[in-house]
Image: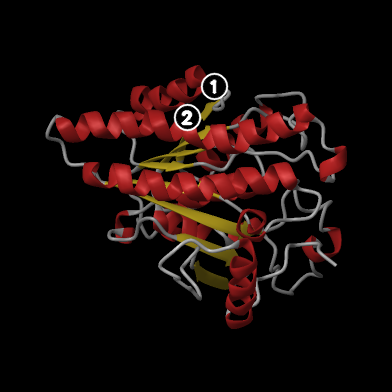
Amino acid sequence: MTSAAKSGLCEGRVVIVTGAGRGLGRAHARAYAAEGARVVVNDLGVGPDGAGGSGGPAHDVVEEIRAAGGDAVAHGGDIATSEGAASLVRAALDTYGRLDTLVNNAGFLRDRMLVNLEEDDWDAVIRVHLKGHFLPLKHAGAHWRAEAKAGRAVHACVVNTSSGAGLLGSVGQGNYSAAKAGILGLTMVAAAELGSYGVRVNAIAPAARTRMTEQTFAETMAAPEDGVFDAMAPENVSPLVVWLGSPSSVGVTGRVFEAEAGRLTVMEGWRPGPTADKGARWTPAEAGETVQKLLTAAGTPQPVYGAR
């Protein structure tokens, strides 16, 4: 992140990254700083299951950014509370006087098969992923709406973090899959509602080595030998996230992208497939017979991760 290495893609922008103390969030924060952004590094410092908490990881990333010549500040609030999310936005405004990009990334796992999944584990994962996206987005969106209504030009970006589990489902991760699927719906609505204020909202479904994946998918996520391309390094995902949060992404909104290793994919969501219209009410037998014919004409769905 030396000044010579900066291309200035995000020069002068102020960027919030949640869950930025480790893994993908850390990589994103450092990558934004390398492109000239001033970064608010949010992290509670909790364990992989959401337990505990420490301000250390956020402060460590801030120090890394500053040591490389960048500008960053730590925020340790709980963004799954309205107060914490509001204070996150205030931290950007109070410290740097503006907010240009919000990267929602915070989360943790509590994996169980559905029949063994406790209600508390369901609530905790839905809270940190889905509510933890909604509340920062709500408070940042309210700020940008006020700016637009005051006649000030807004060129803001939001990058939400979904997952392949949200796109296809993942065995043993019913709570996580539901939360990540909800983030996709939230992204579409936010893009439609905030677009008139000058805000672009997109989502990514990354695959990378983090505390959440290196145990669940240990073999796939293992780091390679020296000199071999580290396909699962979280830094591989960050270039797309930085571009989506930069002025260069103008016109791109309401989209979902997969990012893994050196591969980028535009994901295409639910679209109408084979259809039959009787023009009147079906009987159950007719509906079943018709559905069987439609399924024969339809494509084969992608399998759920971990399905056998």
Residue in front for this viewpoint, 174 or 227: 174
- Of labels 1 and 2, earlier in sequence is 1
- Tag 1 near tag 2, CB within 8 Å: yes
Say left or right for 48 vs 280: right
Residue, far top = 83
- Measuring from the top left, give residue 187's x and y in whole percent: 44, 48
Residue receiving disc 1: 81
- Which residue is pictured at 73% across the width and 46% down the height? 174
Could you tell whether 86 is left or right of 144 in the image?
Answer: right
Q: Give the x, y percent position of residue 198.
A: 24, 45
Q: Based on the displayed image, in which of its 4 quarters is residue 126 positioned? A: top right
Look at mark 2 in the image and give the residue it sits on: 135
* Residue 60, visible in the rendered structure: no
The amino acid type, in three-letter code, at marker 1 is Thr
Q: Is residue 286 above or below residue 209?
A: below
Give the structural element (helix, strand or loop) at label 1.
Answer: loop
Kind of residue sitting beneath label 2: Leu
Whole-percent x and y of residue 19? 60, 37
Taking the image as shown, residue 57 lies to the left or right of residue 274, namely: right
Q: Is residue 216 above or below residue 118?
A: below
Q: Quadrant of the C terminus?
A: bottom right
Q: How is the image coloured?
A: secondary structure
Residue 128: image quadrant is top right
Q: Going 69% across and 35% down the picture, which residue do you hit?
A: 125
